[in-house]
Amino acid sequence: MNCPNKEKNLERCNCSYPGCDKKGLCCECLHYHLKLRQLPACFFPKDVEKTYDRSFETFAKLVLEKKI
């Protein structure tokens, strides 16, 4: 997919998954993760993101703990 904002998006993308083909393609990333009941890396603090647990449940737990 050709995204006019890809370079700008890459500056903010904190995805640490090696070989991710969706880096900088926020729309594709969001749709991919939502199908899996997850949120993209950019919704999580760096220490949690690198665990690759991007589930709704983990996000909700972080919100309740006021970590995000």
Image (tube, rainbow, N blue to C red):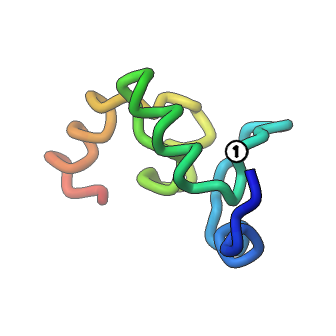
Q: How many marks?
A: 1
Indicate left or right for 34 with 20 as reference. Answer: left
Q: Closest to the observer: 33 or 62?
A: 33
- Element under label 1? loop
* Residue 5 placement: quadrant: bottom right
Q: Which residue is mark 1?
A: 22
How crowded pointer 1 is (Cα within 10 Å; few <14, some 14-19, many 20+) is rated as some
User: In the orientation shown, which residue stands out farthest toward the right?
Assistant: 19
Q: Going 69% across and 59% down the picture, which residue do you hit?
A: 24
Q: Going 82% across and 37% down the picture, which residue do you hit?
A: 18
- The picture places residue 40, in percent across and down from the top left corner, at 49, 44
Q: Going 76% across and 59% down the picture, which residue do you hit?
A: 2
User: In the orientation shown, which residue stands out farthest toward the front?
Assistant: 2
Indicate left or right for 16 with 63 as reference. Answer: right
* Residue 4 placement: quadrant: bottom right
Q: Closest to the observer: 21 or 3?
A: 3
Q: Is residue 35 above or below residue 66?
A: above
Q: Going 42% across and 53% down the picture, which residue do you hit?
A: 43
**Dividing the image into 4 quarters, which one contains the C terminus?**
bottom left
Three-letter code for the amino acid on which mark 1 is drawn: Lys
Q: Closest to the observer: 28 or 1?
A: 1
- The picture places residue 10, in percent across and down from the top left corner, at 72, 67
User: In the orientation shown, which residue stands out farthest toward the top?
Assistant: 36
- The picture places residue 19, in percent across and down from the top left corner, at 85, 37
User: In the orientation shown, which residue stands out farthest toward the bottom?
Assistant: 8
Indicate left or right for 55 with 40 as reference. Answer: left
